[in-house]
Amino acid sequence: MKTLQQIFDIIENNNISIYEYKENKKLCGYELSTYTDGGVNEIIFLDFRNEEQDPKNVNDFLKEFESWINCETIDEKIDRNRQDIRYKEDFTIKESLKDFKNFNKTLRSLFKKISKN
């Protein structure tokens, strides 16, 4: 099994920045900042406060990452972004669909890499 640092290295090598999220100096989760191929900034917030999971545990990290990937459909991502007038001016629905399909595919591929022994 990979260590958390090995997982972080793989994630960062895929152009995703990782920041620790702390409350009262206690690690509660991670914020992963990345971009779709079309340049849309996506923040992946992995929150371990309510699930009684340990943010330093590899299995808990993998579960939370996979959960985030599956928590929002492509339609929901497009709807969320299309609330911004600038986004609507820059992306057609067809372009959004292609961009977020690729983004989901990239995240799923990344998940396979980090969860592989």
Image (cartoon, rainbow, N blue to C red):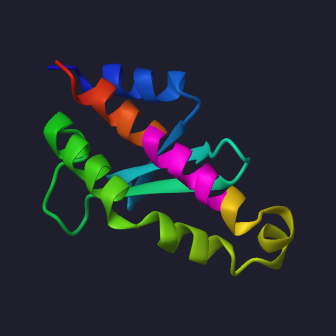
In terms of secondary structure, what is the magenta stretch mainly?
helix
Q: Quadrant of residue 10?
A: top left
What residue sits 21% from the left and 20% below the top? 2
Whether residue 60 sits left or right of residue 95 in the image: it is: left
Whether residue 38 sits left or right of residue 60 in the image: it is: right
The answer to which of 102 and 45 lies nearer the viewer is 102
What residue sits 50% from the left and 71% below the top? 75
Q: Which residues are magenta?
A: 96-105
Residue 61 place in picture, x, y as percent = 25, 43
Whether residue 60 sits left or right of residue 73 in the image: it is: left
Q: Quadrant of the N terminus?
A: top left
What residue sits 43% from the left and 53% below the top? 21
The answer to which of 24 and 98 lies nearer the viewer is 98
Residue 53 place in picture, x, y as percent = 15, 54
Residue 89 place in picture, x, y as percent = 86, 70
**Within the magenta stretch, is there residue 59?**
no
Q: Residue furthest front?
A: 94
Above or below residue 106? Residue 82 is below
Whether residue 32 is visible: no
Number of numbered discs visible in the structure rendering: 0
Q: Quadrant of the C terminus?
A: top left
Whether residue 57 is visible: yes
**Within the magenta stretch, is there residue 103?**
yes
Q: Quadrant of residue 81?
A: bottom right
The answer to which of 82 and 12 lies nearer the viewer is 82
What residue sits 69% from the left and 76% below the top? 82
Residue 48 place in picture, x, y as percent = 26, 58
